[in-house]
Image (cartoon, helix red, strand yellow):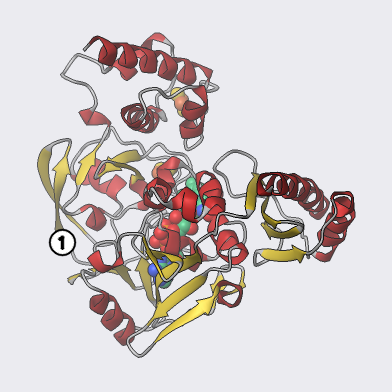
Amino acid sequence: MRNLKAGQKHPVEFELNGRSVKGQAEPRMLLSDFLRHELGRTGTHVGCEHGVCGACTIRIDGRLARACLTLAAQADGTQVETIEGMAPQTGRLSVLQAAFRRHHALQCGFCTPGILMSLDTLLQQNPAAGEDEIRDVISGHLCRCTGYRQIIDAALEAAKSLQKETADA
Amino acid sequence: MKPPPLDYIRAFTTQDILSVLANAGSDTRILAGGQSLMAMLNMRLAQPSILIDIMHVGELTGVTIEHGKTVIPAAVRQAELAEWQGLSKTLPLLAQMMPWIGHAQTRSRGTVCGSIAHADPSAELPLALITLDGEVALRSRKRRRVVQAADFFSGTMLTCKEDDEFIEAVRFPVSDGKAGTAFREIGRRKGDFAIVSCAAIARGKSVRLGVGGVNDIPFIRDFDGLEVSGIPDALNELAWSLDARGDLHADARYRRELVRNLGAQVIGEALQCAT
Ligand SMILES: Cc1cc2nc3c(=O)[nH]c(=O)nc-3n(C[C@H](O)[C@H](O)[C@H](O)COP(=O)(O)OP(=O)(O)OC[C@H]3O[C@@H](n4cnc5c(N)ncnc54)[C@H](O)[C@@H]3O)c2cc1C
Ligand code: FES
Ligand code: FES
């Protein structure tokens, strides 16, 4: 077993968006804080810190996770994906991100990184997702600006373009 | 909104877990999916000094069928159970309930056993375990014991688990495929904890109704020889017999109303698919 003592910093290492990263964390440090303060990756937002708002949603080993309900120590040795890894290259948005821009699916943008991670995961797992599946996944997030309609429209359009892309390929 | 200082222990074997639990006291907690515990730590509602992460223990992974029971070990996440091929055949009622447990974003991390250990009165999994006559396999360094679901829960977030024990697995009897089942719940929003949830199992004219969210512990009632015309009266009597209380989410009267309405719906649906 591995025992990390309270009050001391321990090395934490994982793969972040395909690249190995390292830092130091006390056992009680949240993964959301480790990403933002230790690694300087502020794309993952923090709202409620009790799992409800969804702003901090990321992927760990391919599955969705609330970074605020995860210790940095739990992520040691895993593969972590955050919003910073979503755009295919600098200056180019993913299909889903571009659809968000077109449909005004964000206003203040606080909820956006988390919602994009969830919808991106949904569309990877189920490219044929319709409005019901999209609404179901968005129920794990709070957006105080948009009223959700634009988010759903953007996701539906992204699903359609992604289906077309795979059909054409 | 940050956890208190604590030791983090990553266990790799069941023996690791047992030895830490045996040597440490009541301020040691198992950390499974963290979907309830981490929120409690952030809010300082729990202040353990040692956490044992059990999610790297290979022995506690993988759903199996043994001696007529579906066995779900401690490190099985809710999403893994929902994706398990055998679920709708061996446990049709549970398969109907899985999508209602929190959100996709919490099912991907939260475990089945963690929800049973947490014992929230509104949670779906304790309701499923009680309604389906499941059992809890507990283990400490000194002993192993199996507790029936009906005896495991002792109140709101209280169970008969001792401090040096952990839940090794929960087991559900495999369905014989002959019963009709149905589940419904009402919450403010899909994915929120249920205000009231109802699960029904029907065989011929016998119906079992499980009700969550009303009492401290999910409640079951068996109706034998139930006539369709007698359902409203039976449910009205049941609704009043439950100790419904009002809280910030709903008042007692609304909860009774939900027991009558959801109860009638699930009983109707279960009877229909039983025939
Ligand atoms: C936003 C949100 C919404 C949610 N909505 C719902 C909902 O609608 N319905 C619902 O049922 N749940 C809901 N949950 C809770 C979720 O299902 C949790 O996953 C579950 O209650 C606990 O499982 P866990 O594996 O995450 O356990 P943890 O949070 O890791 O642990 C919970 C407790 O159980 C103990 N424990 C865990 N595993 C064991 C074990 N094997 N042996 C002994 N003790 C153990 C821990 O020490 C702790 O006290 C929600 C959670 C969030 C964040
Ligand atoms: S900050 Fe993690 S869910 Fe709100
Ligand atoms: S865009 Fe402001 S909270 Fe969603």
In depth, the one of B272 and B71 nearer the eye is: B272
Q: Is residue A161 above or below residue B167?
A: above
Residue B139 in the figure: left or right of residue B266:
left
**Mark 1 — residue?**
A10
Residue B184 locus on image (x, y percent): 65, 45
- Count of labels shown? 1
Give the residue type at disc 1.
His
State which chain disc 1 sits on.
Answer: A
Label 1, secondary structure: give it: strand
Residue B156 in the figure: left or right of residue B250:
left
Q: Quadrant of residue B154?
A: bottom right
Residue A105 locus on image (x, y percent): 44, 17
In depth, the one of A169 and A138 nearer the eye is: A169
Q: Is residue B261 above or below residue A24?
A: above
Q: Is residue B63 above or below residue B84?
A: below
Binning the other alpha carbons within 10 Å of mark 1 as few (below 14), some (14 to 19) or many (20 upward) gives some
Residue B102 locus on image (x, y percent): 50, 47
* Residue at the spot 43% in from the left edge and 41% down from the top edge: B104
* Residue at the spot 28% in from the left edge and 56% down from the top edge: A29
Is the distance from the Cβ of mark 1 to the nearest ligand 1 atom less than 8 Å? Answer: no
Residue B76 locus on image (x, y percent): 36, 58
For the question of whether residue A150 can be seen, the reply is: yes
Residue B132 in the figure: left or right of residue A91:
right
